[in-house]
Image (cartoon, coloured by chain):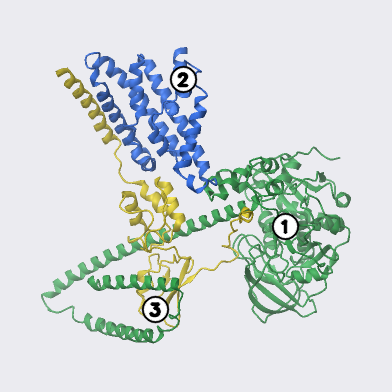
Amino acid sequence: MISAILVMAAIGLVLGGILGWASIKFRVQDDPLVEKIDAILPQTQCGQCGFPGCKPYAEAIAKGEADINLCPPGGADGVNRLAELLGVEPKPLGEGLEAKPKSVAVIDENTCIGCTLCIQACPVDAIVGAAKQMHVIVASQCTGCELCLPPCPVDCISMQVIKEDVVNWKWRYPIHMMKRVA
Amino acid sequence: MNPKLFTFNGGVHPAGHKTESCTTPIRSMPLLPKYVVPMRQHIGEPARPVVAVGDRVLRGQMIGAAEGYVSTAVHAPTSGRVVAIEASAVPHPSGLFDLAVVIEADGEDQAIAFQPIDWRSLDPSALRNRMRDMGLAGLGGAVFPSYIKLNPGGQKIHTLILNGAECEPWITCDDRLMRERAPEMLRGIEIMQHALGCSKVIIGIEDNKPEALTAMRAAAPVGIEVVAVPSLYPGGGGKQLTYTLTGVETPTGGRSTDVGIQVFNVGTAYSLYRAVELGEPLISRIVTVTGHIAQPGNFEVRIGTPLTDLIAAAGGMLPGASGEIVGGPMMGFDLMDLAAPVTKAVNCLIIKNPALFPPKPIELSCIRCGECARACPADLQPFEMYWYSRAKNFGHAQSYNLFDCIECGCCSYVCPSHIPLVDYFRFAKSEIWEREREKRAADLARIRHEFKTFRLEREKQEKAEKFAKAAEKSKAAAAGATDAAAPADPDAERKKAILQAALERAQKAKAQVAPQNTENLPPRVQKEIDAIEARRATVEAKTESTPNHE
Amino acid sequence: MENYLLILIGTVFVNNIVMSKILGLCPFMGVSRKLETAISMGAATTFVLTLASGASFLIDTYLLGQDLSYLRTLSFIVVIAGIVGFTEMFIKKTSPVLFRVLGIYLPLITTNCAVLGIPLLNVREQHNFLESLFFGLGGAFGFTLVLVLFAAMRERLEAADVPKPFQGVSIAMITAGLMSLAFMGFAGLIR
């Protein structure tokens, strides 16, 4: 009886010692997983996921506090890639979230009063202008986050869907001709 | 006579159909009333228009300037007036429109003063810069700006290969050019040799063009080898021809320049001769018009000639035509709009009929027979790439070296299940490119967002410091005067009032404008609007509830 | 020497721990979605199993003996849990993504029946220390082999036109069954 207790205690002590040493030796400082998740997110910084930007959302996913299907600009493709990275089942976009066609914001030059409110709202500094001067959105830097729409007091900003042209045109998926047999 | 040749793996022997168009000499086209010159005729950045609507232009005058490194200039094909600079039909598989300069010819065909270049006394780099403004681009089909290819950079080019293989069925424009204008072409080759500083020159021509071989051999000076290569599609692919002639394989993802070899199309050499010795920019090229047409043959066509006019010049389509292919039947694409003009990339126009080009049989399942792998000249495994491209598993497709695929179409040609493999590869490639574009955009956005956060933080700090300093100052001054802060107030009050007024005006305007076009919306749009409104409401609520920072 | 080779080959192919003893099915189905993960899981299990079979032999022979043999299962589990804990920390440090991907299956190596099964079989077969090590190593190799093969097949299946009712785990089960049949072909090769 005593020997049994002694044996188990000895095993426990030795293993405990090893584990204790390992926990000091292999301590993890920061979580590189956040970077990997952040790299998949589209960086629109739109906040549609409920977090104030892509990085906070990535942190929340890494901690397991947020689901992977909350990013509409990333679309189903983004969800799939997150699922692949994290080794979980892909799922459709969350309730009430919908992937929209890619757009850029455009300021109506006639209505803009130059209040600079949109400049402060833009997460990527893609709006140029000064107080009482007309503002202009740099289309190549606009992420289409729509964050500049609500602050505009005169509603002069509209979203324009990016049109397909010769450069961003993609070859279509070849149609399955087998369907015709059925 | 012929040196030792090497045989690449794979390849196919499609019916040649060369005799339809190669028996008659190159014909010229009458002057047309209108030319449409697209600004994007080459790989890379499109040219930037340098003329305005209403301008009078002369033949050979630059109308689009090269923009960026990978770009080249575009010139007016004839004299006349610029009537429009607008999106027009272009020969592109999508059928989408692209920016073009429309020129109404005045019938005089007056040219600018062409200045021949004394290239022998000119430094190669100065020569290249001139070529950039001459609009030279590879005329074999890839239309890569020639001035870049003439720049060996850090790499030493020891061998120049001239590609006269013209392996694709139906096309004979290089064949005719070599037969009729070999001496001029060889002078162009000499210039290339000078620019690249290479010692060895090999001209590769498929052995199904004996007349072209004879003509080139007769014109070639000592030191330039004219080699007959066996007819095997795609023997005219850059990497394949390099291997056939030298036995050197181009590394994966690399160019032939990585192994000290540069490849040019023979048509490009001829255009280079015209540009340098005659001073004439690239405003015309040879185009094969063949297939189901009255008088098939080759035409010397000005860039910008609408394809309808080209067809008319060849006697018009015969009854029963079922479509047009731009380029060859293996690598070309179906033309969407006949109004599209000839560009530097258009080497052939084939009129289809159901007998010559029967509709593609129904696609069946892959039986993994491996025929495609046997036919692949790039030594790839098309069935594996197909398997993953079809499942949209692009990562895996790429791991099978998808980007080494030259889209020659051999796999689709031999597939017993009639699977359009190349279409899947093109699809996968453009999806991967799109992803890379998105990735770049996301990286840019991330950097900008991080900088903005950093900037706001810094501004906050600076403000705090300023306040602290001001507070200290006022504390020091407090002993004397009691209210130092008062003078700042009226100004702020006035600003606030102005802003308030503007807001009220805007609000009024909004109330008047709002009813417009928000009725009878489709439910999807309405939903979107509702979503934005809801978000706006929450944001407004937030801003109201939180105390004002300013 | 020949004896060790036989043990190795026998455990990898003939008496494969997954395919013929039907042990360790939980990670076999759970972590075979991706090839990379399967390889890493195989490596982790190999590490744990080899160490565990050696350590458990020592414990069984020198600490427990005949008198305390009733403590066998208990002490083995404790040892395995300790080694798994160590492996877990090590992987978390070296590859957080792998740590995340292996997820619940990493601590579950503790309760992987293959990992407990092999030390117990060692005792039953009365292997000496080296034999125990080789038996553990061979069993782990066999486990890794089928896991990697299976993952490679599943990756391919993902791109295939599987009829809807069979998609996902059901086709994986069928594949596993066919694999098991194939491994039966080795039966009788070595006693």
In this view of the protein, which residue sits in the foreground, B456 or A166?
Answer: A166
Measured in 3D between alpha carbons, the distance from the residue under mark 1 to the one under mark 2, in whole angstroms, is 58 Å
Q: Nearer the viewer, mark 3 or mark 1?
A: 1
Residue B359, numbered circle: 1
Q: Residue at x 41, y 71 (%)?
A: B528
Q: Position of residue A81 (x, y in %)?
A: 44, 51
**Both labels 3 and 1 in a single chain:** no
Q: Supply the letter of whichever chain is yellow.
A: A
| Location of the N terminus of chain B (image quadrant) | top right
Front position in the image: B478 or B507: B507
- Name the subunit of mark 2: C
B195 vs C148, nearest the viewer: C148
- Say if C14 sits above or below B76 in the image: above
Q: Quadrant of residue B476?
A: bottom left
- Kindly state the secondary structure of the residue where label 3 is placed: loop
Which residue shows up at 40% across the image and 83% down it? B514
- In terms of depth relative to the viewer, which is nearer, C160 or B485? C160
The chain displayed blue equals: C
Look at mark 2 in the image and give the residue it sits on: C10
